[in-house]
Image (cartoon, rainbow, N blue to C red):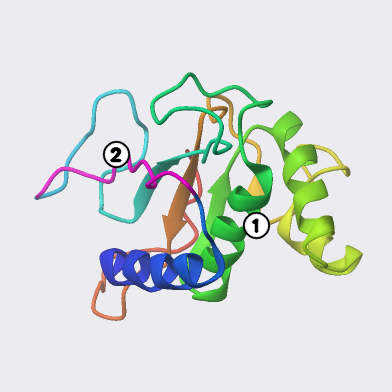
Amino acid sequence: HAVDAVREWIVRFEARSDHAHPLMFGTMSWRHGGKVPGHRSHQSGRDLDIGLPLLARYAQGAAVTPKRVDWDETWALISAMFETGEVTVVFLEYELQERLYEAAKRSGIERSARRAYLQWPRGMHASGLVRHSRGHRKHVHIRFRCGPYEVDCADDSLGE
């Protein structure tokens, strides 16, 4: 289910983006599930890490810093995810959400929608589809909804 959702949002993202570098995918899960070292989640195939896209002037694989991230492309990527209806949460450190907020604003997203998507500027405990989670400075963590056939799955398990 999550892989199908990933395919759908990649098509959406590529239709609106001319990003210079390929997306960098990280951990999703082990082939048959189970604990993934260094993660509290990534055990059911519903979580995926994606590197923050860099500005075109930086080489693929360059160190990821907030000034090197292409925040407009990051917003295009995240908004394409939300459009699938299959994403329940995206984790990104709170202080970086300001840059994402400004990118959403530049893209024409109204204030009320930015408020629904992002915690910033209301505080890291505010509601929002993009939420603070320490350690998410170089990548975003995406959690997908349960598939219709995943009878033992619960969409309310949001701990990172």
137 up-or-down from 149: above or below: above
Residue 29, magenta (yes or no): yes
39 up-or-down from 99: above or below: above
146, 62: nearer the viewer: 62
25, 148: nearer the viewer: 25
23, 9: nearer the viewer: 23
157, 62: nearer the viewer: 62
Q: Which residue position is annotated with label 2?
A: 27
Q: Nearer the viewer, mark 2 or mark 1?
A: 2
Q: What element carries label 1?
A: loop
Question: How many labels were placed on the picture?
Answer: 2
Magenta region: 20-31
Question: Is mark 2 in CB contact (under 8 Å) with mark 1?
Answer: no
- In the image, residue 141 lies at what x, y percent? 47, 43
Quarter of the image holding residue 99? Answer: top right
Q: Is residue 81 left or right of residue 48?
A: right
Quarter of the image holding residue 131? Answer: top right
71 up-or-down from 114: above or below: above
Q: Look at label 1 and name its amino acid.
A: Leu
The residue lying at 33 percent from left, 43 percent from top is 25
Q: Which of marks 2 and 1 is nearer the N terminus?
A: 2
Q: What element carries label 2?
A: loop
- Main SS of the magenta part reads loop
The residue lying at 15 percent from left, 43 percent from top is 30
Q: Look at label 2 and name its amino acid.
A: Thr
The residue lying at 88 percent from left, 44 percent from top is 122
In the displayed image of the protein, which residue is found farthest to the left?
32
Numbered tag placed on residue 98 in the rendering: none
Q: Which residue position is annotated with label 1?
A: 129
Quarter of the image holding residue 121? Answer: top right
Mark 1 neighbour class, 10 Å CA radius: few under 14, some 14 to 19, many 20 or more: some
